Image: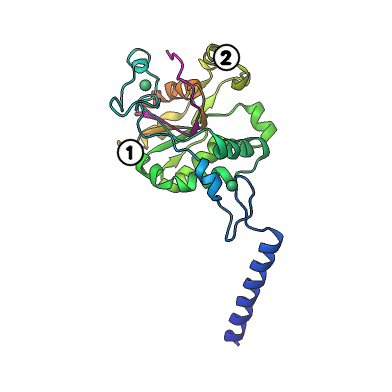
Amino acid sequence: MLVGMSGLSTKLVRMVNRARHLLFPPACLFCQTALDDHDGCCPACLHEIRIWPACTCLRCGTILPEAIAPGPCGHCLHHPPAQQQTHSLYQYHGPVREAILNWKLAGKAAGARWLVDVAEPSVQQLISPHDLLLPVPAPLARMRVSGQHHAANLCAWLAAATGARMEWRLLRRIGEQPRQSSLSGLARRTNLRKAFALCDDYQPLVQSLSPDTRVWIVDDIFTTGSSVHYAARAAIKAGRPVHVLTLARTQHRSPTQG
Ligand SMILES: [Zn+2]
Ligand SMILES: [Zn+2]
């Protein structure tokens, strides 16, 4: 009887898999080209995905010639950002850009999630299980519209990959600011100067951390660096080294940060 049931369940699984392939054929998560096996990335999109280079200024993450990496770059000698290190996984380009736009504007997270999954070995080299991940807080008005806190979702994926702890409420946004993408570099910095703070009761949590804990400010896109700089400046109050990790980064130069 058990053997018969086992045979039946195998048949059922095969039928369900066949139906799934007919109704939802496997496709590239970035361009929707049909794939033979399972959802993933087609060869053409894979060719277009660009990793953020390893030769960078460690402090601000700007790409540097191999001979002078890891910096500090000339900019950081005079105006270093608040964080000790800045890392990004991908260049904001091609399929990576499409995946992030799909995630942020259409709520389709599969492409972004795939990008984090394939970067897992690099992420595990950066983040230790002792570390604390803090998403850059999203403005309430934007969360009400999208129903999503993308940096917090990204933190949750990174925490699952590394065993690190995430606290999405520790770093708070104060007040409502105009959308960053509508502002120039100078206006972005003015807009964000007092936008972030640790919550009032952060001390018990900080005291419970291991002495080796580093704090990671996590965001989806690094554009001018203003958001992560001011978020890091607020997080320094926790008394731990503060680093930054973003899923992707544009090629723009970091602004003067003070
Ligand atoms: Zn594709
Ligand atoms: Zn630098």
Compared to residue 192, the image places residue 7 above or below, namely: below
First to last magenta residue range: 242-258
Question: Which is more N-terminal, label 2 or label 1?
Answer: 2
- Asked if the magenta segment contains residue 236, the reply would be no
The residue at 31%/29% (across/down) is 66
Determine which residue is flagged by label 2. Answer: 184
Looking at the image, the residue that sits furthest to the left is 67
Image quadrant for the N terminus? bottom right
Mark 1 lies on a secondary structure that is loop
The residue at 28%/27% (across/down) is 67
Compared to residue 186, the image places residue 86 above or below, namely: below
Left or right of 79, for residue 189: right
Q: Position of residue 54 (x, y in %)?
A: 36, 34
Q: Position of residue 129 (x, y in %)?
A: 37, 44
Determine which residue is flagged by label 1. Answer: 210
The residue at 38%/14% (across/down) is 79
Do callouts 1 and 2 mark residues in contact (Cβ within 8 Å)? no
